[in-house]
Image: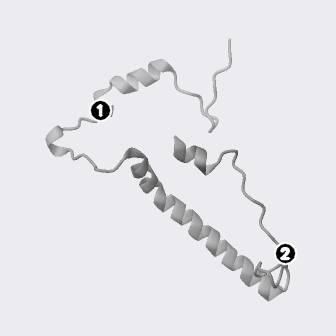
């Protein structure tokens, strides 16, 4: 016997037979009536980016709130650096981000 492949949430992956049964069930299907459908004038990548925008904005908001709390604690307690600039940290520079690819590679394709 071989081990079953486990999903990243530690749940067993459904078999091909289970997926086929779900696909063939009529209550699982979406029936789109052409007269009631409308074609969006957006490209698919733009639409996916637009759908992800609330999640991204929520995450940025949470990070900004965390930084605001960090600054307040640093000022009140007197530990840490409340603001990183040339007066508090002369010569400090953030290291460049390296993702293993460049923007020119992304925009070419």
Q: Are marks 2 and 1 in contact (CB under 8 Å)?
A: no
**Does dot 1 land on a helix, a strand or a loop?**
helix
**Residue 53 coordinates in the image, percent (x, y):** 47, 59
Rendering colour mode: one colour
Q: Nearer the viewer, residue 13 or 89?
A: 89
Q: Residue furthest left?
A: 35
Q: Which residue is mark 1?
A: 27
What residue appears at the point 48 percent right and 19 percent down from the top-left corner?
16
63 to the left or right of 107: right
Image: 14 above or below 47: above
**Residue 83 coordinates in the image, percent (x, y):** 75, 81
Residue 95 in which image quadrant: bottom right
What residue appears at the point 41 percent right and 21 percent down from the top-left corner?
20
Mark closer to the chain start, 2 or 1: 1
26 to the left or right of 11: left
54 to the left or right of 7: left
Mark sitting on residue 86: none
Callout 2: few (<14), some (14-19), or many (20+) C-alpha neighbours within 10 Å? few
Q: Which residue is mark 2?
A: 91
């Amino acid at each position: 016997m071989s081990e079953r492949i486990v999903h990243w949430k530690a749940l067993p992956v459904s078999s091909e037979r289970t997926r086929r049964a779900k696909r063939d069930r009529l209550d699982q299907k979406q029936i789109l009536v052409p007269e009631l459908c409308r074609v969006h004038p957006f490209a698919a990548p733009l639409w996916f980016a637009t759908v992800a925008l609330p999640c991204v904005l929520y995450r940025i908001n949470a990070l900004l709130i965390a930084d605001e709390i960090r600054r307040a604690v640093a000022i009140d307690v007197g530990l840490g650096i409340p603001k990183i600039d040339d007066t508090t940290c002369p010569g400090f520079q953030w290291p460049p981000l390296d993702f293993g690819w460049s923007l020119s590679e992304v925009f070419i394709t």
